[in-house]
Image (spheres, coloured by chain):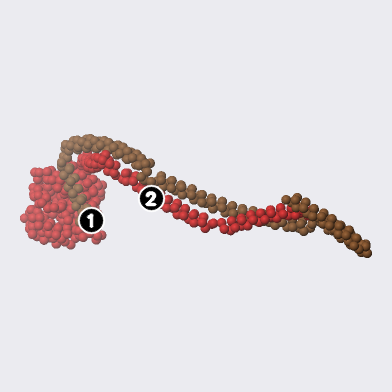
């Protein structure tokens, strides 16, 4: 029995020693596991990976840049690309010019297909710009002053003198209030058309301009309507355009403001505006009593200078008026006045104007 | 080896017993007075020895259990340490392998991204061809458009010339130009020029 135990104990002792040795070995192996060495390797590997990835990114960017360079310009595609690029540039430049030319031609066609309408449209644009300027002046937002020089009772035998004088001056336009039978002129139609082509405004001053006693203009409303309409038709026949402004023969306020109230209603019905003046040259008297051009000039300068928007009453049958006008216009231009034509869109239409 | 030891030990015990008997016989011869006492004493000793030989070896058993426990404990802790060690090693080796794989992947990607590589040279060549083809097509298109424009311009010029033959065309044109010039002049005034 003893021997048995001894043998067993020896075996167990050996086994225990082996287990302890294993345990000890594993303990040391565990506690002395080379973590720092691994971590150093990890760090090195990560650094290398990061560097490689950076290099990859840079390489990709370089690759993309080279592709983009090719796409950037045809001249980057070698000789063939350069040739195509040059041809394209020439053609595109020419095409641009051609397109512009075509657009211009199309605009011309559109305009030329109905010239009277195109002229009316352009006149309205012009008139609205003038109105904008008037409003700015009234609001004190512009230092420009406007002078509407009106010449009544034409065309006359000396209207061409006025036109020639006006043609010699830059950007000076006036308004002709025409009356068919007021003055005889052998070339009335030609004068009217010339007034139009020179950029002046041609308006209605009645057909007969008879105001004496029970003159046909004001004898009754039917007569008045007829006078306006006849002149309207005559102007349309002569110029191709219907006027939109009427000036009462003798002026609206000259007859007392209530006397012509019904006539104004007739004008409204006919789509007309009306206008008087706020500066008078007093050049419409009897021929033997006509004032001198010097006096007219003095009146013009004095009266106009007090107004930001002046409407001068003159007549294109008076030579003194022509002389005064030629002298006054440059002087007034120096004082900041511009000379524009009157159109129905003007703020001066109707009772806004006060006769002087 | 163990059997041999056991056999040697048994032989030795037998020799000793024989020596003791011989001694006892000699002693019997020397003194008869003490014979009885000596015999009694010897028998008592024999009984005692015999009893001693048959007693259960507790120490051995204890030692055995102790060794078993110690061995089991050592094996248990050894196993624990082993598991821990394997876990650590597996984890770190795994990470190392992962990082190595990542590095290889990154290096492969770098090789692929190399702008001077044949693959990319090929791509650029293909792109160049495509761009040239597109440019050629565009050139043809522009040439065609240019020809169409020429034709349209010619047609428009013809129309304009026809329209200019209208009655009073020049008269209206002069008025139009005069108004246009006037409008531009007033625009200049509005803009402060």
Tell me the SS state at disc 1. loop
Q: Residue B114 location in percent, x, y?
A: 38, 46
List the single residue furthest toward the bottom: B33
List the single residue furthest toward the left: A288
Please count the marks in the image. 2
Q: Residue B123 location in percent, x, y?
A: 36, 41
Q: Residue A88 location in percent, x, y?
A: 25, 40
- Classify residue A331 by image quadrant: bottom left
**Marked residue chain, label 1:** B
**Residue located 75% across and 54% down the image:** A6
B29, B163: nearer the viewer: B29
Tell me the SS state at disc 2. helix
Q: Residues within 10 Å of mark 2 (few under 14, many from 20)?
A: some
Q: Is residue A160 left or right of residue B14?
A: left
Q: Nearer the viewer, mark 2 or mark 1?
A: 2
Mark 2 sits on what residue?
A: A58
**Residue located 16% across and 44% down the image:** B174
B123, A1: nearer the viewer: A1
Q: Is residue A91 left or right of residue B80?
A: left
Mark 1 sits on what residue?
A: B191
- Chain A is shown in which shade? red
Q: Residue B169 location in percent, x, y?
A: 17, 40
- Classify residue A256 by image quadrant: bottom left
Labelled pair 2, 1 in contact (Cβ < 8 Å): no
A254, A113: nearer the viewer: A113
Q: CA distance from mark 2 to mark 1?
A: 55 Å
Query: Among the chains, which one is brown?
Result: B
**Residue located 13% across and 50% down the image:** A153
Q: Quadrant of the C terminus of chain B?
A: bottom left
**Marked residue chain, label 2:** A
């Amino acid at each position: 029995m003893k021997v048995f135990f001894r043998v067993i104990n020896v075996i167990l002792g050996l086994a225990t020693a082996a287990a302890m040795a294993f345990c000890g070995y594993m303990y040391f192996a565990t506690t002395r596991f080379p973590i720092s060495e691994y971590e150093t390797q990890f760090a090195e590997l990560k650094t290398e990976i990061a560097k490689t990835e950076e290099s990859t990114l840079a390489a990709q960017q370089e690759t993309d840049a080279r592709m983009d360079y090719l796409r950037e310009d045809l001249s980057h595609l070698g000789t063939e690309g350069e040739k195509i690029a040059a041809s394209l540039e020439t053609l595109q430049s020419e095409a641009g010019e051609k397109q512009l030319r075509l657009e211009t031609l199309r605009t011309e066609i559109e305009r030329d297909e109905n010239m009277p309408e195109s002229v009316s449209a352009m006149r309205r644009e012009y008139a609205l710009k003038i109105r904008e300027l008037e409003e700015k002046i009234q609001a004190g937002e512009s230092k420009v002053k406007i002078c509407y020089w009106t010449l009544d009772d034409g065309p006359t035998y000396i209207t061409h003198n006025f036109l020639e004088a006006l043609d010699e001056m830059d950007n000076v336009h006036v308004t002709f209030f025409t009356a068919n039978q007021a003055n005889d002129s052998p070339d009335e139609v030609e004068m009217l058309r010339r007034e139009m082509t020179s950029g002046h405004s041609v308006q209605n001053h009645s057909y007969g301009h008879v105001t004496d006693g029970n003159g046909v203009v004001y004898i009754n409303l039917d007569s008045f309507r007829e006078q306006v309409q006849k002149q309207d038709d005559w102007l349309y026949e002569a110029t191709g355009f219907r006027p939109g402004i009427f000036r009462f023969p003798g002026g609206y306020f000259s007859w007392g403001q209530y006397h012509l109230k019904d006539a104004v209603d007739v004008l409204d019905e006919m789509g007309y505006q009306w206008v008087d003046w706020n500066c008078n040259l007093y050049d419409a008297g009897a021929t033997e009593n006509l004032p001198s051009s010097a006096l007219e000039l003095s009146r013009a300068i004095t009266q106009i200078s007090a107004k930001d928007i002046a409407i001068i009453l003159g007549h294109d049958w008076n030579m003194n008026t022509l002389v005064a006008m030629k002298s006054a216009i440059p002087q007034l231009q120096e004082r900041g006045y511009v000379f524009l034509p009157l159109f129905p869109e003007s703020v001066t239409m109707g009772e806004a104007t006060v006769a002087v | 080896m163990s059997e041999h030891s056991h056999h040697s030990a048994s032989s030795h015990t037998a020799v000793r017993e024989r020596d003791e008997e011989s001694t006892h016989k000699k002693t019997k011869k020397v003194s008869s007075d003490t014979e009885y006492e000596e015999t009694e004493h010897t028998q008592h000793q024999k009984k005692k020895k015999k009893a001693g030989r048959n007693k259960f070896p507790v120490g051995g058993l204890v030692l055995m259990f102790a060794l078993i426990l110690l061995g089991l404990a050592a094996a248990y802790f050894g196993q624990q340490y082993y598991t821990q060690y394997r876990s650590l090693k597996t984890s770190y080796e795994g990470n190392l392998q992962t990082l190595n794989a990542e590095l290889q992947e990154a290096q492969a990607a770098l090789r692929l991204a190399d702008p001077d590589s044949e693959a990319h040279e090929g791509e650029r060549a293909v792109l160049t061809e495509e761009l040239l083809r597109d440019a050629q097509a565009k050139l043809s298109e522009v040439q065609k458009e240019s020809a169409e424009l020429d034709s349209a311009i010619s047609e428009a010029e013809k129309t304009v010339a026809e329209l200019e033959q209208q009655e009073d065309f020049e008269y209206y044109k002069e008025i139009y130009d005069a108004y246009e010039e006037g409008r531009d002049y007033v625009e200049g005034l509005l803009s402060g020029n």
